[in-house]
Amino acid sequence: MIQDTSGQDKQVAPSLGRRIKWPVTIGAGVLLVSGLVWASVSGSSVSESIARSELRFATLERGTLVRDIAATGKIVAANAPILYSPEKGTVSLIAHPGDKVEQGQVVATIESHGLTNSLKQQEALLEGMKSTLERAKLDARREQLKAQQTLDMAKVDLDAADRESRRGDQLIENDLISKIDYEKNKDELHKAKLQFAHAKQEAALMKDTLSFELQNTASEVSRQALVVAELERQVAALNITAPVGGIIGNWLTEQKARIDQSQPILTVVDLSAFEAELAVPESYADELGLGMDVELNIGGVMVMGKLSSISPEVHNREVATRVRFAQDAALHLRQNQRLSARVLLENRPDVLMVKRGTFVNSGGGRVVYSMQGEIAQRTDILLGARSMSHIEVLEGGEVGDQWVISNIDLFNNAEQVLVR
């Protein structure tokens, strides 16, 4: 029997070169592809690489740029007067904080003994002066009567002298009296005429004098009446009333406290009209103007209003402003309720703009990285007007360009960066 050659077979292990052939081939291919990619991006000009997930991008577009200012504030009553003490005294607070009051309702009283005593004294003085005026009127009538009596008697004497003068004229014609007696009658007539004229003038002067004195006394009574009226007003003002309807805000003094004149007592809040009080950064103060539109966010509800007042002073680097808006019961407004707002400065149509990002601060607003495929290219830019959400692009970009709007400090000021 002839045996086969299986007994001569010998198992041979593969060589080392054959085992590493395929891994080496695959690795070389990867390196070649990487080299080609690296060469395609200008080789040595790309000095950095950053992961895309670490960056934020935005596309340049044309549209209307709304310049605005972000601000925060609170709801305040448009009318919340503070009531002050009109005089020194002891205060009695009638209405309590939170109480509803009507216009004209007494909310506090001031007890001032000095003022009430002064009123009583001046009232008594006024009554005395009125009595003096009435007495002066009676005296004036009496004096006028005496003057009239004197005038009447002078008239009687004049008539008698005139009668004797006429009798003398008749007698002298018949030579029944002497010429001396005739001349004496004429002197008596002349004397009677003078006395009547003087009496008449005296009566007229007496009337004018008495009228002047009565008018002077009446003026003094009128002045005293004004003093009493003023004191009555001051005493009435001790009952402090609410100038508007609403609720009592806060007590600004203690119950039964001794207070001075013009010291604040309490506040009354008019709940029928609210305004928004905003704090705007002082850097925007020069751009604010009355009547500007303001968008208010009150509890998630957007309301439009108008800028109604701007404070002339700066406090804590902020300018206080007031905004009027249409009242709506659905808003459920409350005093000091917090809100956010946008003051709309102007609208700029057909503007090349990009979304706002931290690249403005990190690049100083002069440098940005524009995407060209997978390469971020350092680009010089010029920015214009800014809003809360967008920035105007004046130079360095076109519509459709994609910019890195996140912090560009990661790029280390490189000219080109690979975004992988």
Image (cartoon, rainbow, N blue to C red):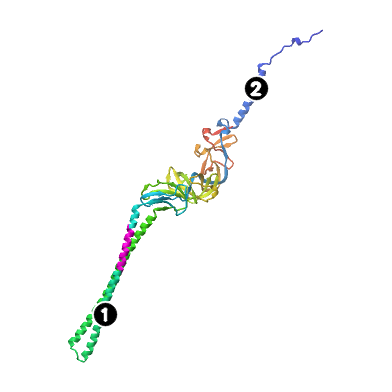
Q: Residue furthest top?
A: 1
Within-10-Å neighbours for mark 2: few <14, some 14–19, many 20+: few
Residue ID for mark 2: 23
Specify whether residue 397 is painted magenta: no
In the rendered view, tell whether residue 126 sits above or below residue 203.
Answer: above
Name the residue: 23% across, 88% down: 169
Name the image quarter holding residue 35: top right
Residue type (three-letter) at the residue carrying disc 2: Pro
Q: Are marks 1 and 2 in contact (CB under 8 Å)?
A: no
Name the residue: 67% across, 16% down: 15
> Which quarter of the rendering shows the N terminus?
top right
Q: What label does residue 155 carry, if any?
A: 1
In the rendered view, tell whether residue 19 sits above or below residue 97.
Answer: above
Boundaries of the magenta span: 121-137
Q: Residue furthest bottom?
A: 174
Mark earlier in primary sequence (1, 2): 2
Asked which secondary structure carries label 1, the reply is helix
